[in-house]
Image (cartoon, helix red, strand yellow):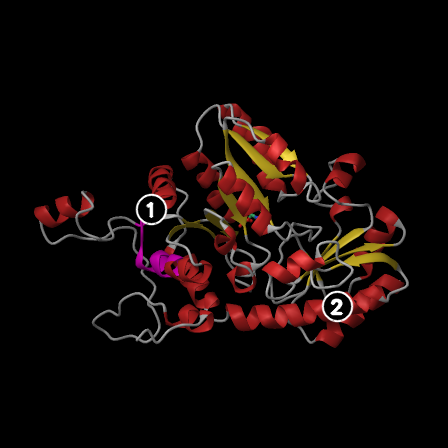
Amino acid sequence: MRIIKHFETEAIRTQSKRSHFGEHATPLYMTSSFVFDDAEDMRASFAEEKEKNLYSRFSNPNTTEFVDKIVAMEGAESGYAFATGMAAIFSTFGALLNSGDHIVSARSVFGSTHTLFTKYLPKWNIETSYFKVNEVDKIESLIKPNTKILYAETPTNPAVDILDLERLGKIAKKHNLWLIIDNCFATPYLQRPIEYGADIVVHSATKLLDGQGRVLGGVAVGKKDLIREIYLFSRNTGPALSPFNAWVLSKSLETLAIRVEKHCENAFKVALFLENHSNINWVKYPFLKSHPQYEVAKKQMKKGGNIVAFEIKGGIEAGRNFLNSIEMCSLSANLGDTRTIVTHPASTTHSKLSENDRLEVSITDGLVRVSVGLEYIEDIINDLDQALRA
Ligand SMILES: Cc1ncc(COP(=O)(O)O)c(C=O)c1O
């Protein structure tokens, strides 16, 4: 009988083999390489006739434990861990694409992913066509004979729009494309894209997977044959996660379910509070009935996540004034931390884009993104309220 059936237990009980010391928690394997018994052991290990760690750019017990947990949580076959989320995304493209290939992607993707599409992948003759989050109907018209990948993140950063994973899965299958989903905002606790047909799921582990704003990390999980290609690319190009960060991240996953539950509870309360606030135009949260893709969110997510987006009345100036008036919450570029973080994309992260380009990805001048943390809810709401009234 298989005793472990639940996500929470798997996150805690997936563990690398104990050493002869019989330690309870996993030790930190701070080693760049591994030793062999003799020449034959070394030959067979390099020939992959034996499953052994060779060198920490390839694998390490700490990174393997972290990857094994994400593989179990996402329902994947295999995975590889990276130094950052961007390393996971870039290496996935680098491993799977050839010169002349084409990507179809949602327009609302994380800024650096967008820069990969517009600045770097074209250097290798890889072009990308975009669809807006409310234009899933148009995807099929963008697919060409050389299209290899359908790419999206959901919920999106920063506007928390939702893409229908079931529809994306069906389109990818019909056209024989690899569906790649950035599951960073939802985490596998809230949403499992592989169940809808995703071939690869990528994460910035820097966000809710760590959840405490300490380390950078990334991971790609999915079909065994594709991950094998990603592994071979990465073992040669070198974006590996450090054993220390993997050790931290693996520990973090033990509390992912309980943390994300509380993040969602707090975020929903913040969204309800903002819904009735006189100084805002609108608030967007996946589990508010007013969210344009509420039904889709309910179908594919367990809860609404920890990001709330709203539009402050008064545009850029009001946004700046709001940030300046915040007392407790942090002004920071990160998200998915125990600490509540507020950002105003139009005056900071996306200030270099024209207003039109910002609107293309739903970033209005008054848009504020709140990554709701784990502080006591009354303290979070009181800080937002006083800054909105300032
Ligand atoms: C949705 C999403 N994907 C990828 C990344 C990149 O992750 P990292 O900063 O770990 O490289 C981020 C970072 O904010 C993100 O929000």
Query: Does 236 sit left or right of 201 as displayed?
Result: left
Query: Does 389 sit left or right of 283 as displayed?
Result: right
- Please tell me whether residue 59 belongs to the stretch shown in magenta: yes
x, y (%) of residue 182? 55, 49
The one of 5 and 23 positioned closer to us in this rendering: 5
Crowding around mark 1 (Cα neighbors within 10 Å: few <14, some 14 to 19, many 20+) is many
Q: Quadrant of the C terminus?
A: bottom right
Check the image and report above or below for 269 versus 366. Answer: below
Question: For the magenta stretch, what is the residue range?
Answer: 56-67
x, y (%) of residue 277? 87, 65
Q: Nearer the viewer, mark 2 or mark 1?
A: 2
Q: How many marks?
A: 2
Check the image and report above or below for 304 versus 25. Answer: above
User: How far apart are the two marked residues, 2 and 1, measured between alpha carbons?
Assistant: 42 Å
Check the image and report above or below for 258 versus 105. Answer: below
Mark 1: which secondary structure?
A: loop
Residue 332 picture quarter:
bottom right
x, y (%) of residue 208? 56, 61
The one of 147 and 31 positioned closer to us in this rendering: 147
Q: Which mark is residue 270?
A: 2
Three-letter amino acid code at the position of disc 2 = Val
Q: Which mark is residue 57?
A: 1
x, y (%) of residue 133? 68, 44
- Please tell me whether residue 30 belongs to the stretch shown in magenta: no
Query: Does 378 sit left or right of 115 as displayed?
Result: right
Residue 86 visible here: no
The one of 144 and 369 positioned closer to us in this rendering: 144
